[in-house]
Amino acid sequence: MSLSLDRSKLAVVTDVVIVGAGPCGLFQVFELGLLGLKAELVDSLSQIGGQCTELYPDKPIYDIPAIPVCTARELIERLQEQIKPFNPGYHLGQEVTEVSARADGRFDVATSRGTRFDAGAVIVAGGVGSFQPRRLSVEGSERHEGHSIHYRVKDAASFHDRDLVIFGGGDSALDWTLELIERARSIVLVHRRAEFRGAPASVERMKALVEEGRLDFIEGQVQSIVEQDEKLTGVRVTARDGVTRTIATDQVLVFWGLSPKLGPIAEWGLTIHRRTIPVDTHRFQTNIPGIYAVGDINDYPGKKKLILSGFHEAALAAFAVKEHMRPGEKIHLQYTTTSPLLQKRLGVTGEAGDGAAGDAGARHRA
Ligand code: FAD
């Protein structure tokens, strides 16, 4: 658990940092909120929802209690609505890289973007790991990442009037090709097959552009990059006919999808077994007191990687966190139906509850 935090940034002081904003991380906010605990959500993806949003947003889910059917996207929208009263902080597009226990029992947490937290507890809801773009596996490509080789579009305007090569055959590759075709000087789309995974309408539009001579398409694979004076000047692509040609470009966009990596979670001193974190089944605590794990990432006898299992785990983990942060304090089980305190925290009666601010609230410390 090494710590090399950027001390120049103020740390967000909070009750709990939740690593992962998938369905279980989101519901964790709710269960903590009912107990008056404030949470900050961090996810390496730029959107919430984990696998639901990233892998199957439009597929129907049939096994969420009391919701006979909804799409994965709808489930995430409903969860976001449900946790609104507890006003969680969202820190998206950044990976939690460091978690370190302090002598006073609290945790220093840091992300890849330099966001820092001072948290009473940490709940790992990291699913199958943090989603990372599949990268070009050609020598030297990492040197150009972020300048000439891109795995996501941060600023579309930076590609205007440029010669672009776009790799991929899914929605992202097609959407950006269609988006940039009017503004780029030229685009060459490269995909290893003639079949595309993107929406049929996008595929049709792309093919029409190729026929009109406004877009080049190569069915082929990247071989290497071309550099001059340490700058990227082109890529070599071998087409299906076996001919390798060099395409002059200094801007390459790669959309080969995302793959989950356990990544930094494995470096925080947690016991890891087959890419999962063993926990007990009454608190969902890991081998480090104060760090809990819920959802797909945890493991215990009988574990089922289902959303509803994660919801149950989140409820028990919230009680355990409360106990950890207020040792010896009696925690009463209350019903949302009848408890004035819970209803106050939910903001459904009287003033918005003290729970909305949390025990710690969201403060900053140097
Ligand atoms: P995830 O949804 O995996 O979210 C974890 C999040 O943590 C990710 O967004 C990831 O980016 C983030 N993360 C990880 N590490 C870090 C880090 N270090 N820093 C920042 N962020 C990090 N389940 C059902 O119950 N019913 C179904 O019908 C169903 N259908 C499915 C269909 C498909 C095609 C798939 C793939 C799964 C399906 N599942 C279903 C399983 C369900 O999606 C998972 O059980 C659920 O998503 C687990 O939720 P989670 O919150 O634990 O993790």
Image (cartoon, grey):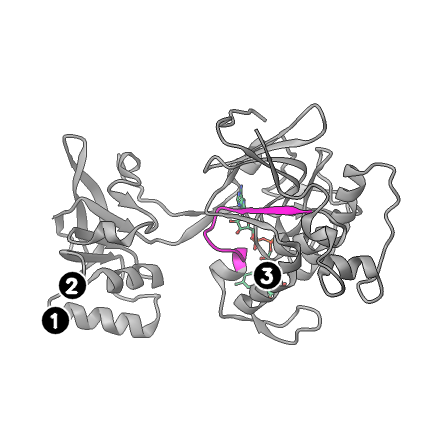
Q: Amino acid at mark 3?
A: Gln
Task: Evaluate if marks 1 and 2 touch, with contact meaning CB atoms under 8 Å apart.
Answer: yes
Gap in angstroms between the C-alphas marked 2 and 3: 40 Å
Where, quadrant-wise, is the C terminus in this rendering?
A: top right
Mark sitting on residue 212: 1
The secondary structure type at the circle numbered 3 is helix
Q: Is residue 70 left or right of residue 236?
A: right
| Residue at image mark 2 | 215
| Residue at image mark 3 | 80
Which residue is located at x 57 percent, y 52 percent? 21
Q: Amino acid at mark 1?
A: Glu
Percent coordinates x, y for residue 24 in the rendering: 63, 55
Q: Residues within 10 Å of mark 2 (few under 14, many from 20)?
A: some
- Decide whether residue 46 is among the magenta residues: yes
The secondary structure type at the circle numbered 1 is loop
Mark sitting on residue 287: none
Query: In this view of the protein, can residue 314 be seen by the observer?
Result: no
**In the figure, residue 229 lies in which quadrant?**
top left
Percent coordinates x, y for residue 243 in the rendering: 13, 52
Q: Amino acid at mark 2?
A: Leu
Gap in angstroms between the C-alphas marked 1 and 2: 8 Å
Quadrant position of ligand 1: bottom right
**Looking at this view, is 32 or 268 the one in front?**
32
Query: In this view of the protein, can residue 220 be seen by the observer?
Result: yes
Percent coordinates x, y for residue 250 in the rendering: 18, 44
**Looking at this view, is 13 or 320 the one in front?**
13
Q: What segment is highlighted magenta in the picture?
A: 38-51
Label 1 or label 3, whichever comes before in sequence order: 3
Q: Please tell me whether residue 154 is drawn above or below residue 360 in the rendered image.
A: below
Viewer-side label of 1, 3: 3
